[in-house]
């Protein structure tokens, strides 16, 4: 990783406003951008990158101010994720997932639980990972006196190998009750496998994990009081919240692709010898493509920002969240996810039309933008996101809360 990390973050005053924190994210992105292509090729565990997120204060963005957090809301968090992803899609994803898992205690837990978790996370600048892949067989949770034991395997565990704490999820043996708990990532019985070897998002440490009787206290089971779960509709807001994270780092990757391509066009691209122009930036079709792609990106960013504001109103009053309010929000998020998927894939693909054959050299690293969005946009089928919107339009049908809707 570049040694160009700013050294004055520890000496100058911390950001205060949302715009200040977005500016801090821009500084982080500038550091990441220096060697983004090289780090992507190396595929090393992003320990230095996570340290950068901690040193910059971005990991505590949503934390309580009285414990050293920034006290910002989700509308700012989404923009911070988008900004970081412009430089490095993997680190944008890690940061976005961190925000969701940091918030998981508030989504599912009791007030006492989430206040404790958020205070500890802010004070210690914890970085969160999660072992909650729902497509795998459920992890089994068994009782052992006042403790719970988690046993099983997950094929994806984003960020956990470079995290301080990991969110676990499983089903209480003999019941259909799901249990969430946060444990130290170095807990006995928790083994992370170095087996993430995909074409994109190479630095997300999204490999598998084995849980062999990982122990935690019953009192850490989120939302349980006297071993009974206390459900709220707000519990189900985890899916639209993380899906909006997805959309924002897709948009960040797309924005980074456009910025990087435009710089290449200005400084390296050659005009076509039969086009009649001395500079590539004067080619009419080049100008048209940049204008077309930028307009499409701006439109989806505006939609994403509007939907983030709608979601923030739900986060501001969790106990008032109704099934209808939750369902309407999920539909809006589904629309953002669908459009962000389409525009990010289009931009990451079409930038080569305006950079030319020489831009495909591996040293340029322009392919990483397409590989990154292509990899993660397969997380869940975008057709089912469009289906949510279509059923809502035609029948007023609200999506049933699941792990993906």
Image: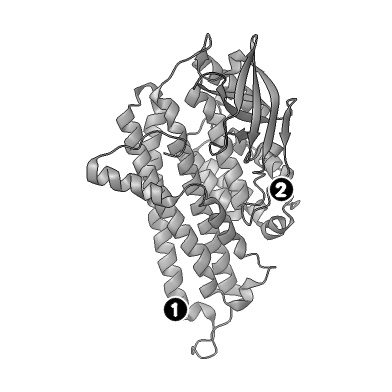
Query: Residue 369: which quarter of the image?
Result: bottom right
Name the residue at the front extreme: 174
Name the residue tied to disc 1.
Answer: 285
Find the distance from the CA under tag 2 to the CA under tag 1. 39 Å
Q: Nearer the viewer, residue 324 or 14?
A: 324
Horizontal placement of 89 versus 389: left or right?
right
Judged by depth in the image, the label closer to the viewer, 2 or 1, is 1
Place of residue 303 in the rendered image (x, y in percent of width and height, measured from the top left): 37, 49
Q: Nearer the viewer, residue 285 or 349?
A: 349
Name the residue at the left extreme: 395
In the rendered view, tell whether residue 180 sits above or below residue 256: above
Q: Is residue 11 visible?
A: no
Horizontal placement of 45 versus 56: left or right?
right
Q: Which residue appears at 74% of the width and 50% of the height?
A: 44
Tell me the crowding category of disc 2: few under 14, some 14 to 19, or many 20 or more residues within 10 angstroms, Cα based.
some
Q: Nearer the viewer, residue 315 or 276?
A: 315
Q: Which residue appears at 55% of the width and 89% of the height?
A: 273
In the rendered view, tell whether residue 159 sits above or below residue 181: below
Q: Please identify the quadrant where the C terminus is shown.
A: top left
In the rendered view, tell whether residue 62 sits above or below residue 45: above
In the rendered view, tell whether residue 117 sits above or below residue 404: above
Place of residue 26 in the rendered image (x, y in percent of width and height, measured from the top left): 58, 49
Residue 217: give its label: none
Place of residue 252 in the rendered image (x, y in percent of width and height, measured from the top left): 52, 53
Q: Element under label 2?
A: loop
Q: Which residue appears at 40% of the width and 61% of the height?
A: 296
Q: Is residue 48 visible?
A: yes
Q: Element under label 1?
A: helix
Query: Residue 33: which quarter of the image?
Result: bottom right
Between disc 2 and disc 1, whose residue precedes? 2
Name the residue tied to disc 2.
Answer: 5
Place of residue 80 in the rendered image (x, y in percent of width and height, measured from the top left): 53, 44
């Amino acid at each position: 990783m570049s040694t160009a990390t700013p050294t004055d973050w520890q000496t100058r005053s911390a950001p205060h406003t949302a715009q200040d924190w977005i500016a801090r994210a821009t500084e982080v992105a500038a550091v990441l951008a220096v060697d983004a292509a090289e780090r992507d090729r190396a595929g090393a565990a992003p320990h230095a990158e996570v340290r950068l997120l901690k040193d910059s204060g971005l990991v505590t963005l949503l934390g309580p101010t009285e414990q050293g957090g920034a006290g910002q809301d989700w509308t700012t968090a989404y923009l911070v994720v988008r900004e970081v992803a412009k430089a490095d899609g993997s680190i944008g994803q890690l940061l976005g997932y961190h925000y969701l898992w940091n918030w998981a205690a508030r989504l599912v837990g009791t007030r006492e639980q989430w206040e404790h978790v958020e205070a500890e996370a802010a004070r210690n600048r914890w970085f969160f990972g999660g072992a909650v892949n729902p497509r795998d067989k459920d992890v089994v949770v068994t009782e052992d006196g006042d403790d719970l034991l988690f046993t099983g395997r997950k094929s994806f565990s984003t960020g956990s190998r470079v995290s301080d704490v990991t969110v676990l999820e499983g089903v209480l043996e003999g019941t259909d009750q799901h249990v969430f708990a946060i444990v130290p990532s170095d807990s006995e019985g928790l083994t992370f496998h170095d087996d993430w070897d995909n074409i994109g998002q190479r630095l997300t440490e999204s490999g598998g994990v084995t849980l062999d009787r990982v122990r935690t206290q019953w009192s850490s089971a989120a939302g349980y009081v006297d071993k009974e779960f206390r459900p709220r509709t707000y519990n189900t807001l985890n899916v639209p919240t993380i899906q909006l994270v997805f959309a924002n780092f897709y948009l960040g990757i797309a924005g980074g692709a456009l910025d990087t391509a435009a710089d290449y066009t200005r400084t390296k691209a050659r005009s076509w010898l039969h086009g009649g122009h001395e500079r590539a930036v004067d080619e009419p079709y080049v100008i048209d493509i940049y204008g077309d792609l930028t307009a499409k990106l701006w439109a989806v960013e505006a939609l994403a920002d509007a939907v983030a504001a709608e979601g923030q109103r739900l986060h501001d009053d969790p106990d008032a969240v109704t099934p209808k309010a939750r369902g309407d929000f999920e539909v809006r998020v589904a629309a953002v996810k669908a459009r962000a998927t389409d525009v990010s894939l289009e931009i990451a693909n079409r930038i080569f039309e305006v950079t030319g054959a020489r831009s495909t050299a591996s040293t340029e690293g322009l392919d990483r933008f397409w590989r990154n969005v292509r990899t993660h946009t397969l997380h869940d089928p975008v057709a089912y996101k469009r289906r949510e919107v279509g059923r809502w339009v035609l029948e007023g049908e609200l999506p049933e809360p699941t792990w993906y809707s």
